[in-house]
């Protein structure tokens, strides 16, 4: 028979807790480091650590080679069960997790062959035709499961486009949670506006007469406002660990479908805030044989420059490129990459401790792809291989090609397509002379009727709106 404390020890070994990337920042500015560890539930519902750091798991679970290979020929949900289960085993029972996952992924994950054994993984089949659906849908359902059943949660997001609609659609119909999305009137495309305004149900969009930063400031002011504390705000932005976890899954899924006998794979992830690539970094640490993680950026080249030179300098203000969801001059998830390699960087871009850059270079390749190269790549892949890429996916593919040109060919490769080409019809028509096929999820969007609320950039008016329209009870 086991002694009591042996049993506890085993339980403690198994349980994953989450700590803050800022925990070591004693004496750095106004930050009071948070030195505690929290459950997945708390990390999910809080979004960010109290010291504004990002939550990191204190242990990375291992998935055996056998388990990975067993996913071959299985549906996507099996990969999600395997990967999410290793993190959530002691916080969510298996039956509940299965319901959450089946409900999150009623769509396919096509692997399109480009040439030889090089593939495009299309993560664009979800309801908003963006890879952000993968993370947002699972996070929404996990929040629905973990929320305190007596209180309503109010998700508040500022968006400049795609995140808002993915988050809005993901939370649609989730009981006990309402979503308010703020977007800048003049900075979203007509189609994006339609997408946001017409979600309906428990999701409301507010069009703000200002810029994205104004939206973000209104949200930031509302969160700590004591007169609104009764509304239980939570955020759903890309730094929530609940959005990172689902982004580990598709790497395992793709590998299992494409591998022959346990060989390595090169993965290319077009990168902006680095949340998607972080999923691959974790997947490798969990046991996936990733030979190289390729992280191409657009002309916002702070990371490739850092890998080359060893000193970090953010791009500020960020540059407006064709792949607009990647126009990021200081990626928020860089803090997690630094942490995994023994370094510390805060959200202003100040490096407090250098990461092990040799180890980073060993695992990661990064390159900046210009808009010109992006366009050339869209044309070339269509002419040579009949495959239509949109600007983000083209940055990914061109980044992979660049890596192979520098380091020699590698048999098995996958590059991610993170949005559907139909989201960029003008660019595609201009370059290819054909209109991309519109997926079911986007059909009829221009005719949908929506009703948005319009507000000025004025916190007092915004607060009144929240007080009048949001509820605290279920
Ligand atoms: C958000 C987004 C990206 C960038 O992903 P990160 O996780 O922020 O690096 C790439 N492509 C598309 C289409 C996106 O919406």
Image: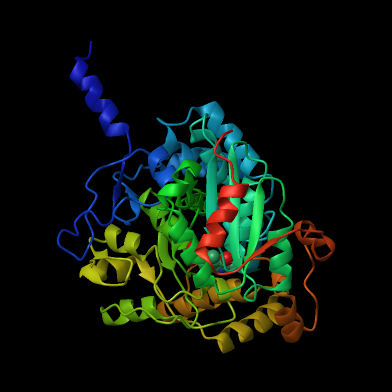
Q: Residue at x 22, y 26 (%)?
A: 9
Residue farthest to the left, as pictured? 27
Asked which colour scheme the image uses, the reply is: rainbow
Q: Residue at x 54, y 49 (%)?
A: 155
Rendered image quadrant of residue 372 = bottom right
Question: In which quadrant of the rendered image does the C terminus lie?
Answer: top right
Count of marks placed on residues: 0
Q: Residue at x 42, y 53 (%)?
A: 225
Asked whether, in this view, residue 379 is left or right of residue 412, the answer is right
The answer to which of 242 and 209 lies nearer the viewer is: 209
Q: Is residue 99 visible?
A: yes
Residue 306, relative to residue 472: is it above or below? below
Rendered image quadrant of residue 303 = bottom left
On the image, the x and y values in percent for residue 253 come to: 55, 49
Q: Is residue 418 visible?
A: no
Rendered image quadrant of residue 350 = bottom left
On the image, the x and y values in percent for residue 48 come to: 38, 52
Asked whether, in this view, residue 253 is left or right of residue 308, the answer is right
Q: Residue at x 71, y 46 (%)?
A: 201
On the image, the x and y values in percent for residue 254 come to: 56, 54
The answer to which of 267 and 193 lies nearer the viewer is: 193
Residue 454, relative to residue 316: is it above or below? above
The answer to which of 399 and 141 lies nearer the viewer is: 141
Asked whether, in this view, residue 344 is left or right of residue 414, the answer is left
Asked whether, in this view, residue 408 is left or right of residue 158, the answer is left
């Amino acid at each position: 028979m086991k002694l009591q404390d042996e049993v506890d020890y085993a339980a403690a070994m198994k349980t994953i807790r989450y700590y803050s990337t800022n925990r070591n920042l004693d004496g750095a500015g106004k930050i009071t480091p948070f030195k505690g560890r929290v459950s997945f539930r708390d990390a999910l519902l809080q979004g960010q650590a109290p010291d504004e750091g990002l939550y990191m798991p204190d242990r990375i679970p291992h998935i055996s080679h056998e388990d990975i290979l067993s996913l071959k020929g299985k549906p996507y949900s099996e990969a999600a069960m395997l990967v999410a289960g290793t993190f959530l085993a002691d916080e969510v029972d298996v039956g509940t997790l299965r319901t959450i996952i089946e409900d999150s992924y009623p769509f396919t994950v096509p692997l399109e062959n480009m040439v030889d054994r090089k593939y495009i993984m299309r993560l664009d089949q979800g309801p908003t035709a963006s890879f952000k659906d993968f993370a947002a849908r699972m996070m929404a359902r996990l929040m629905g499961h973990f929320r305190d059943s007596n209180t309503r949660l109010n998700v508040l997001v500022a968006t400049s486009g795609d995140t808002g609609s993915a988050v809005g659609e993901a939370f649609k119909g989730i009981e006990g949670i309402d979503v308010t999305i703020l977007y800048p009137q003049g900075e979203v495309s007509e189609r994006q506006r339609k997408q946001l305004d017409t979600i309906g149900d428990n999701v409301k969009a507010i069009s703000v007469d200002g810029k994205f930063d104004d939206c973000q400031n209104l949200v930031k002011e509302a969160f700590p406002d004591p007169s609104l504390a009764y509304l239980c705000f939570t955020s759903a932005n890309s730094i929530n660990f609940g959005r990172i976890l689902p982004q580990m899954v598709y790497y395992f899924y793709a590998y299992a479908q494409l591998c022959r006998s346990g060989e390595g794979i090169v993965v290319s992830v077009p990168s902006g805030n680095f949340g998607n690539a972080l999923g691959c970094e974790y997947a490798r640490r969990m046991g996936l044989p990733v030979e190289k993680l390729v992280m191409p950026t657009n002309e916002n080249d702070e990371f490739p420059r850092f890998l080359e030179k060893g000193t970090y300098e953010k791009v500020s203000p960020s540059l407006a490129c064709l792949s607009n969801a990647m126009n990021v001059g200081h990626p928020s998830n860089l803090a997690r990459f630094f942490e995994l390699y023994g370094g510390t960087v805060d959200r202003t871009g100040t490096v407090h401790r250098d990461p092990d850059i040799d180890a980073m270079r060993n695992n990661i390749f990064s390159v900046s792809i210009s808009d010109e190269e992006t366009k050339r790549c869209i044309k070339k892949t269509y002419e040579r291989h009949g495959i239509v890429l949109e600007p983000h996916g083209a940055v990914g593919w061109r980044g992979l090609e660049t890596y192979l040109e520098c380091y020699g060919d590698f048999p098995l490769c996958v590059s991610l397509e993170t949005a559907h080409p139909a989201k960029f019809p003008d660019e595609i028509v201009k370059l290819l002379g054909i209109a991309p096929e519109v997926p079911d999820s986007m059909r009829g969007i221009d005719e949908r009727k929506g009703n948005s609320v319009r507000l000025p950039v004025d916190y007092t008016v915004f607060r009144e709106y929240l007080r009048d329209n949001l509820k605290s009870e279920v």
